[in-house]
């Protein structure tokens, strides 16, 4: 889909790639999960369905392609885990990064380093305060 006419005239099937990408992300999260039995991963379909308050079949259907409110919720959830929503939703995502680490401030290394320094300073200050009591 390269222009507005294509987008406006698109059918639901033209967006099935979104569900396929959501499935890819969930499978990647399962693979990276440290659990011994991958079926018990917090990212299993069963556990994801419970987390979102939907049934197992809803997650399965979303990953097959049909768009729904659950699709949007999954996109936002994966965004909170560092995935780029544009990678998920753009038909031509070849040059879009899958992980959106730069926008999620929590993941930026300089922010993490500064937080560690701040935390260390607070611990030192509290220790000195306790000594003076």
Image (cartoon, grey):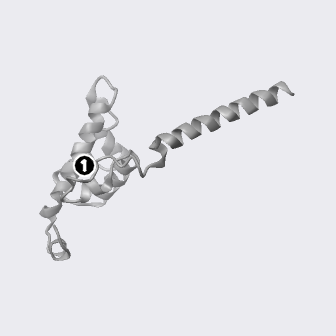
- State the image coordinates of residue 81 (x, y, percent, origin top left): 38, 45
Query: Is residue 25 among the parts visible in the rendering?
Result: yes
The structure residue drawn at horizontal position 58% and vertical position 39%, both measured from the top left corner, is: 115
Left or right: residue 65 versus residue 77 is left
Vertical order, 48 against 62 (above or below)? above
Q: Quadrant of the N terminus?
A: bottom left
Query: Is residue 61 among the parts visible in the rendering?
Result: no
Vertical order, 30 against 16 (above or below)? above
Q: Nearer the viewer, residue 95 or 132?
A: 95
- State the image coordinates of residue 110 (x, y, percent, origin top left): 51, 42
SS at badge 1: helix
Residue extending furthest toward the top: 36
Q: Nearer the viewer, residue 34 or 95?
A: 95
- State the image coordinates of residue 70 (x, y, percent, origin top left): 30, 56
Q: Quadrant of the C terminus?
A: top right
The structure residue drawn at horizontal position 27% and vertical position 29%, both measured from the top left corner, is: 38
- State the image coordinates of residue 82 (x, y, percent, origin top left): 38, 46
Count the marks: 1
Q: Quadrant of residue 42?
A: top left
Residue extending furthest toward the right: 133
The structure residue drawn at horizontal position 48% and vertical position 45%, both measured from the top left corner, is: 106
Residue bearing mark 1: 22
Q: Quadrant of residue 66?
A: bottom left
Disc 1 packing (10 Å; few <14; some 14–19; many ≥20)? many
Q: Quadrant of residue 33?
A: top left
């Amino acid at each position: 889909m390269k222009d507005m006419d294509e987008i406006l005239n698109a059918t639901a099937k033209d967006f099935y790639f979104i569900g396929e990408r959501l499935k890819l992300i969930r499978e990647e999260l399962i693979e990276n999960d440290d659990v011994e039995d991958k079926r018990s991963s917090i990212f299993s379909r069963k556990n994801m369905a419970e987390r979102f308050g939907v049934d197992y079949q809803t997650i399965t259907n979303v990953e097959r392609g049909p768009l729904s409110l659950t699709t949007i919720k999954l996109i936002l959830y994966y965004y909170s885990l560092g995935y780029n929503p544009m990678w998920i939703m753009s038909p031509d995502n070849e040059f879009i990064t899958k992980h959106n680490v730069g926008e999620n401030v929590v993941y930026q290394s300089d922010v993490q380093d500064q937080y560690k320094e701040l935390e260390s300073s607070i611990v030192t200050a509290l220790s000195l305060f306790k000594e003076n009591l």
